[in-house]
C-alpha cells in the first residue's frame, strides 16, 4: 500500500478505535492489533506510531473548569421514538460517567473502635 493511499489522520483514528475495542495497550500491542485487523495489509512503523500516540495524550487544563448542568429538551412526539430515546439515554450515561470520574472521592469518616466485652 503506497503512503499516499492512507489519508492523513487515519492512524490516529485506528489507534483510538483499537484502544476503544481492546482497552489500554502498549504501543507494540496497538501496532500488532492494527496489523491483524487489516489482514497484514498495513505495517505500522514505530517511528510513525509513537508521535501519533503523543499527539493523542490527554492533559488537564491549567485552570479550573466551572461545573455545568445538563438539561435535555425534546418535543413530546419524540418521547417514545426509539432513536431519540437511545440518544437521550446515551447522553445521560456519558455525562454520569464523566461526572463520576471527575468528582473528588467522598470523604470517609474515621472508623470508630468499639470495646467488646467487659
Image (cartoon, rainbow, N blue to C red):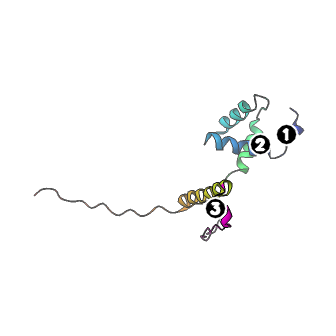
Disc number for residue 11: 2
Q: Secondary structure at mark 2?
A: helix
Residue 70 located within the stretch drawn in magenta: yes
Instruction: Point out the tag, 1 or 2, that comes first from the N-terminus.
Output: 1
Q: Is residue 9 above or below residue 84?
A: above
- Secondary structure of the residue carrying tag 3 is loop
Which image quadrant is residue 107 in? bottom left
Pick the residue in front: 100 or 96: 96
Tag 1 and tag 2, C-beta contact below 8 Å: yes
In the rendered image, which residue does mark 1 sit on? 6
Residue 25 in view, yes or no: no
Q: CA distance from mark 1 to mark 2?
A: 9 Å
Number of other residues with Cα within 10 Å of mark 1, as a class: few under 14, some 14 to 19, many 20 or more: few
Point 65% across, 44% down: residue: 20
Q: Is residue 100 above or below residue 7?
A: below
* Residue at far top of view: 40
Contact check, label 3 and label 2, Cβ < 8 Å: no
Residue to which mark 3 is pinned: 79
Tell me where residue 102 appears, x and y as whole percent: 56, 61
Q: Position of residue 23 (x, y in %)?
A: 61, 42
Residue at 24% x, 59% y: name it: 113
Figure quadrant of the N terminus: top right
Write the start and end of the magenta stretch as one range. Answer: 59-81
Q: Position of residue 73 (x, y in %)?
A: 66, 68
Mark 3 surroundings within 10 Å by alpha-carbon count, few (fewer than 14), some (14 through 19), many (20 or more): few
Residue 38 on image: x %, y %: 76, 32
Between 22 and 107, which is closer to the camera in this rendering?
22
With respect to residue 98, does 1 lie above or below? above
Quarter in which the C terminus is drawn: bottom left
Which callout, 3 or 1, points at the residue further toward the start of the chain?
Answer: 1
Amino acid at each position: 500500500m503506497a503512503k499516499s493511499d492512507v489519508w492523513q489522520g487515519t492512524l490516529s483514528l485506528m489507534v483510538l478505535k483499537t484502544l476503544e475495542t481492546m482497552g489500554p495497550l502498549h504501543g507494540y500491542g496497538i501496532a500488532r492489533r492494527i496489523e491483524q485487523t487489516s489482514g497484514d495489509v498495513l505495517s505500522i512503523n514505530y517511528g510513525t506510531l509513537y508521535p501519533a500516540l503523543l499527539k493523542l495524550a490527554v492533559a488537564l487544563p491549567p485552570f479550573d473548569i466551572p461545573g455545568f448542568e445538563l438539561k435535555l429538551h425534546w418535543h413530546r412526539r419524540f418521547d417514545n421514538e426509539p432513536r431519540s430515546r437511545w440518544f437521550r439515554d446515551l447522553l445521560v450515561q456519558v455525562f454520569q460517567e464523566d461526572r463520576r470520574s471527575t468528582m473528588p472521592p467522598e470523604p470517609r469518616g474515621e472508623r470508630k473502635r468499639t470495646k467488646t466485652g467487659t
